[in-house]
Amino acid sequence: MAYFIFAYHLLVVYLSCSRISLSLAQNLPLKAVNLGNWLVIEKWMKPSLFNGMPNDDLLDGAQIQLKSTKLQKYLCAENGGGSIVVANRASASGWETFRLWRVNENTYNLRVFNKQFVQKDRVTRVVAVNNVPGGWETFEIVRKPDDKYRVRIKASNGLFVQVKSDTEVAADYEGYGWEDSNPSVFIMTVKTDLHGEYQLTNGFGPDRARQVLQEHWNNFVTEQDFRFMSANGLNAVRIPVGWWIAYDPNPPKPFVGGSLQALDNAFNWAQKYGMKVIIDLHAVQGSQNGWEHSGTRDGYLEWGDSYISDTVRVIDFLAKRYAYHPAMIAIELMNEPWVDVNLDTLKRYYKEGYEAVRKYTSNAYVILSNRLGWPVDPKELFSFASGLHRVVVDVHFYNLYEDKFRNMNAQQNIDYIYNNRASDLGAVTTSNGPLTFVGEWSGDWYAKQEIDEDRKRFIKSQLEVYGRATFGWAYWSYRHDSTPIWNLKGLIENHFINL
């Protein structure tokens, strides 16, 4: 009798798993949309998030160059770091550029080309030798009241950095004044490219950041949006998340808690409206590409072997939490690793991340993102993935970001989709290989003087070609407050696109 009871339970489990497996398969290929800028911030998609931030041009990762008004030469970390700081360069490039780590709205660490930090040494010399910032590596940037790019740099000893000669820079100036002859006055050039989650949370500080993000999470994507998506032909969402979500509600500083509840809500809304969820680990600790959407602090790509166990921990957390949720369809282990990420290291992580998912589910798909950049073999993951179960390779197709697209007109862009993109997708879509997923694409291009009909034909060509991907596609993005062509919700509402 016990044997028959045991056999009955095995049959129930088998049938249940079979139903889940069949259900997942019936959803393919996916017609999905990315919920970009919801749980991983990208300012270009909603600039108002940064409104009211003090010194908003001096955020983490801002790159500054400092030209002495007295010598008319730039400060430079000799040899790119590991030595003294000098003031003898007539023009500025990499060694003359300092990346900011923001301590507060006025106080900063300055990171040099080789990743050391500028400091006042045990005497008063200014050097760049330490790899970890501390008190001696902290400087206040004092801006002239009527000219914010005319600055003086106050060191931890309370004295100002001055250029004594072109090879001697010291933190020992006690004088005042803003005249050109003052050896402590510099003209600061600022390049601020990074406006991601790190820049927002560290720029506002924990209390204000929590308020800003909570309001954003509550309103940028809602249950009504899932109803809208489902009613308009979409059957899945790809949700970018950051590594800090695994530590919610108390993630490491400067990140703030709350995004996990928003993700829980998304799963429940997806289930209610018959949709599936792809969790996309968009931002990993150490940054896999140096871009703001990777959660980077200063734009350096530092993800590698030493970060594998931490990143696997995030995947394990997400898989354990959502593996049995009816809306779960896939976990993407990492978004857009750059070509500088070592391929063997990436494969090692992908194997461990895959195994972390399989601890909790044999049905959910595991998505592996191709590396971006040149030269990358689009099939470099195929032999690795061939022995794995329910694996998908993600490729991103934008007619942007490369010089070859800059002079294409509307018809050339459309022809590129039907010819080149179709060929690219066909090359990675094989009967015995992993499934294929165009995880990001959009209707944007560089073409000028286009008309709406041209843009509609461009989008239609992509829908036709990317519809051949065996796992499906995901448009970037559902909402975009700045650029309508990136805003799928608006495109649908305005009958620009019909799914």
Image (cartoon, helix red, strand yellow):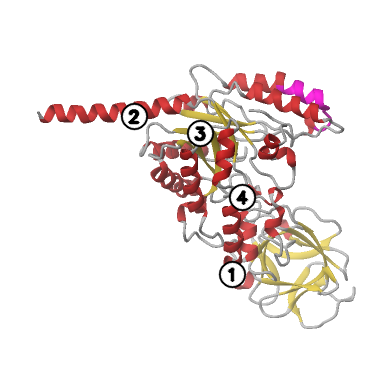
The amino acid at mark 3 is Ile
Task: Name the residue carrying label 2.
Answer: 17
Between 439 and 161, the one lying in front of the other is 439
Res 487 → quadrant: top right
**Earlier along the polypeptide chain: callout 2 or callout 1?**
2
Between 489 and 353, the one lying in front of the other is 489
| Between marks 2 and 1 in the image, the one whose residue lies nearer the viewer | 2
Q: Is residue 455 magenta?
A: no
Q: Quadrant of the N terminus?
A: top left
Label 4: how many residues lie within 10 Å, few (<14), some (14-19) or many (20+)? some
Q: Position of residue 443 (x, y in %)?
A: 72, 33
Tell me the SS state at disc 4: helix
Q: CA distance from mark 1 to mark 3?
A: 40 Å
Q: CA distance from mark 3 to mark 2?
A: 20 Å
Task: Name the residue carrying label 3.
Answer: 367
Tell me the SS state at disc 2: helix
Q: CA distance from mark 1 to mark 4?
A: 38 Å
Between 218 and 58, the one lying in front of the other is 218
Q: Is residue 449 visible?
A: yes
Task: Name the residue carrying label 1.
Answer: 134
Tell me the SS state at disc 3: strand
* Residue 115 higher or lower than 126, as above or below: above
Which residues make up the magenta segment?
Answer: 406-417
Q: Mark 4 and mark 1 in contact (Cβ < 8 Å)?
A: no
The amino acid at mark 4 is Phe
**Earlier along the polypeptide chain: callout 3 or callout 2?**
2
Res 65 → quadrant: bottom right
**Earlier along the polypeptide chain: callout 2 or callout 4?**
2
Disc marking residue 335: none
